[in-house]
Amino acid sequence: MQTPLPSLETMYQALLKKDSRFEGIFFVAVKTTGIFCRPTCTARKPKKENVEFFSSVEEAVKKGYRACKVCHPLEYQGEIPYWVQSILEEIQTNPYAQLKDQDLRERGIEPNRLRRWFKKHYGVTFQNYLRASRVGQAFEKIKEGEKVIHAAYQSGYDSLSGFSDSFKKTTGFSPKESKKGRVILTNRILTPLGPMIAGSSSEGICLLEFTDRIRLDKQLQKTEELFQAKLTPGESPHLNQLKNQLLEYFQHKRTDFSLPLDVPGSSFQKEVWQALQRIPYGETRSYQEQAESINNPKAVRALGKANGDNRIAIIIPCHRVIGKKGDLRGYAGGLWRKQYLLELENERQ
């Protein structure tokens, strides 16, 4: 279902006035140029009969419009509100920060508003996010040899019992079992195609999915089951490396990723995922060609399913596999994203 839009006259007047209040509410496309823009674009304003309005980037791309090079409607800067960005930066600087409701109010932030934003974008409340993040950092330190009691107090806990209870609720095991236990540290990464959820084990990147992909909840549950580990908000060197390399990819500065990956699966799935990584940047393969590349030409259907089971979008480039006649098929993140990624890679050639 399409998101309801303001009236055509309201949107056109907002376009003429470059009204920033309508940022994120609509995008405008110009029929005569084939370009779509933000409502605040500084480019010359078109006549009313030459414009078309959309509620999302996806709708504009599906209609064949290209992104404006003046206002960059695919850019993700500002997608996180400034009042949330300041809090996220503070947490990144001090992952053990304890920000109570009064602390938030002193920063001019309404706690309930922040709770709702985190619940919508991270699936947990702000306070739960803080607790899980502290536990994730503590887990890494304990696994590296830090004493449990030191990790507890560094994480801001006043008692060892309180820390242990919180730790077990978050990870599924006690702090003393950290040497054997596993967690998957997760974070949200903004891209021109929308936010993605990324996850890393201690061995490498194990998850990268668009947050609105089909059946994301089942994919996350499956990931926890495969790794026998809980998804926990946090930072890691692998995730920081991923953020940097994804940014370079979308800026046409990177064609290959050099990231450690952690991808458990059947021998067939691993073979398929390795074959995907051998498809050169800017090129595509049909499902039949991919099946032949693993010396299993009759496995087209099974190969398609293995592509769908891929948990690391873009890095393991299942978007480069298309139909025999060049048609786009089977992409959990949406065919419009698949189209964009292929066009992005073709532009770099």
Image: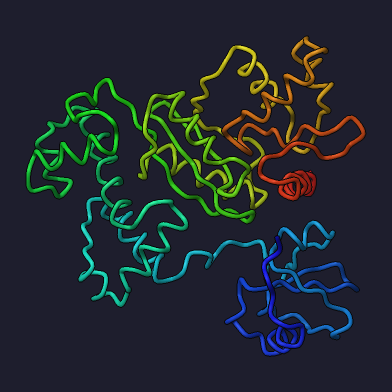
Determine the image quadrant of residue 15: bottom right
Q: In this view, does 233 lie above or below 32?
A: above
Residue at left 23%, top 62%? 99
Spot occupied by residue 327 in the image (x, y as percentages of width and height)? 87, 39
Spot occupied by residue 28 in the image (x, y as percentages of width and height)? 75, 74
Determine the image quadrant of residue 20: bottom right
Spot occupied by residue 221 in the image (x, y as percentages of width and height)? 47, 33
Q: Nearer the viewer, residue 205 or 335?
A: 335
Side of 40 where 292 appears, left or right: right
Determine the residue located farthest toward the top in the rendered image.
295
Side of 72 where 127 appears, left or right: left
Side of 130 where 255 appears, left or right: right
Residue at left 77%, top 21%? 301
Determine the residue located farthest toward the left in the rendered image.
159
Q: In this view, does 174 lie above or below 109?
A: above
Task: Locate the N terminus and report the quarter of the image it occupies.
Answer: bottom right
Q: Nearer the viewer, residue 241 or 269?
A: 269
Residue at left 40%, top 58%? 118
Side of 65 where 305 appears, left or right: left
Spot occupied by residue 248 in the image (x, y as percentages of width and height)? 59, 48
